[in-house]
Image (cartoon, grey):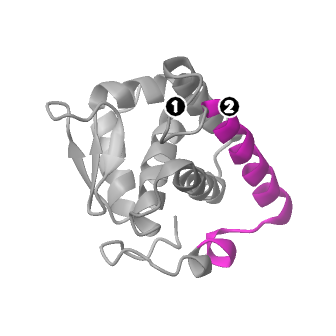
Amino acid sequence: MADISKLINETAAHMGATPMNAESADVNCAETDGHTLFYNPSFMSQIEAAGGEDGLRFVVAHELGHQLGGMDNGGHAGEFMADEFATRCLVEMGADFESISGVFGMLHGMNPNGSETHPAAGSRSSRAQTVFDSERRHGVGIDEEIAPTHKRVNPNIKDITYC
């Protein structure tokens, strides 16, 4: 088992986010305000159990995807965009899809039908699998596909093309 706080701190710092342990706050998972990645260690322990260290990295990258989208990218479309960004990050890092699948499996167990703000985990996993397979097949990385399409990059984020 990884030192979750250390792994989250390193991954978030690498991606230009400031992590904050929010166990005592009203944060039951992981979220961002555009400046800080708030995370609940208990939730992140569940993520690690389901998706390993790369599952943790996926969640951090997902939240960074929200930051890059300018923070007005909520709802289902925003969740899919952040998932796709995180999936591409994991491809760039050489991860396998099992870690991503593990995260979505855990989320499915928490809420199988999704919500008003989050699509069902099965739909999210299917879309992430499509992106993952495409990235692996075509070798498209973040530099070629993601970075140029974001017109409103959050000024609080450092250059993440090395994701």
Amino acid tagged 1:
Gly
Of the pair 14 and 148, the residue shown nearer to us: 148
Q: Position of residue 82 (x, y in %)?
A: 53, 55
* Three-letter code, disc 2: Gly
Question: At x 79% / y 56%, what residue is drawn?
Answer: 136
The residue singled out by tag 1 in the image is 52
Q: Which residue is nearer to you in this view: 162 or 79?
A: 79
Question: With 38 as the anchor, is 83 left or right in this view?
Answer: right
Mark 1–mark 2 CB contact (< 8 Å): no
Badge 2: few (under 14), some or many (20 or more) residues near its Cα, within 10 Å? some
Does dot 2 land on a helix, a strand or a loop? helix
Residue range of the region highlighted in magenta in the rendering: 121-146
Determine which residue is flagged by label 2. Answer: 122
In the picture as drawn, the residue positioned furthest to the top comes out as: 109
Name the front one of labels 1 and 2.
2
Question: Percent position (x, y) of residue 133?
Answer: 80, 50
